[in-house]
Amino acid sequence: MQKHAIIGAGAVGSILYYLLKDNHEIDIDIYAKEVRKLYITKNDEPIETNKKTKILPSKTQYDTIFICVKATATKTLIEDVLNMCHDHTNIIICQNGISQVDLFNHPYTYHAVVYISGQKKNDEVVYFQDNTLILPDDDKLITLKQCTDLSQLNIVLDEKHQEKQWFKLLVNLGINTITALTKNTAQVLEQKQIESLTEQLLAEGCTVARHHGIALGEETIENIMAIYKTYHPLMGTSMYYDVCENRLTEFEYIQGYIQQLASSYQLHTPILNTVTALLAGYQYKRK
């Protein structure tokens, strides 16, 4: 039997547990800051109320460890995570951004492209849609994929993983920025001015990506805007929920990361520069 650990019982971690739990070939532990029961709902119906979280540190070693905490919390967990690894453990980072792999001194560390949508409020997680992790097409991950194929989780091994990472980064650049700065949900894109501003921001992001050597099709912006139209109007984003709850955001790993690359390539990105400055201003001296 495979032993899996999920670090973080927020929206992504809790939903990931739900997607995996019916595969009886996997023994799953989920870790949070305190011991509590998971409470997950979908379409106003409870779908998980019995699983209890554990707390770190742990002496158990796992075959796969999914990192589902905020990117800003990763550095505080590295020692605990490495102590839970054996020589062949897969560490799967399920976070925003694309730059966290190097933090772990472990050869089998991968950054997933995450398509799982949900919201955590207090101890309740609302599962909206999606069930997919996109990972590199690496032979080391075949066993993990075969194992999870017996669950509701859809793992895709993609030889164009880097391009898929950047595509999702750009998806987050647009929708996270707009929802956070307007403090409104996906419905805000119904406004033509906001829709146009989002497209301009995405255009700047695509320019940065191409200068960084990422092959993006001419239809990238159109495809991302089409994805936004599939969102429920009242669905928020991680950054939207952060600002609504007066929490720190992960802007350094999305807008900040892209803006740093733009600066290094001396690109003209006025909208990206402005929204990054505003998000940094929101976070200034905030604890």
Image (tube, rainbow, N blue to C red):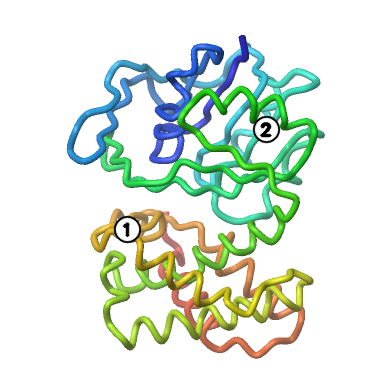
Estimate how packed mark 2 is, as few (under 14), some (14 to 19) or many (20 or more) residues with alpha carbons within 10 Å: many
Quadrant for residue 74, please give it: top right
Which of these two is toward me, 59 or 285? 59
| 121 sits left or right of 89 in the view | left
Disc 1, SS: loop
Give the numbered dot on residue 236.
1
Picture quarter containing residue 106?
top right
- Circle 2/circle 1 CB separation < 8 Å: no
**What numbered label is drawn on residue 91?**
2
In this rendering, the answer to whether 60 lies above or below 117 is above
Numbered disc 2: secondary structure: strand
Identity of the residue drawn at 61% across and 27% down = 65
Residue 232: x percent and y percent?
28, 59
User: Image point 31% across, 73% down: which residue?
Assistant: 182
Residue 61 pos. (x, y %)? 66, 14
Residue furthest out toward the top = 1
Q: In this view, does 286 lie above or below 13?
A: below
**Residue at 38% over, 57% down:** 237
- Report the side of 41 relative to 90 (left or right): left
Residue type for callout 2: Ile
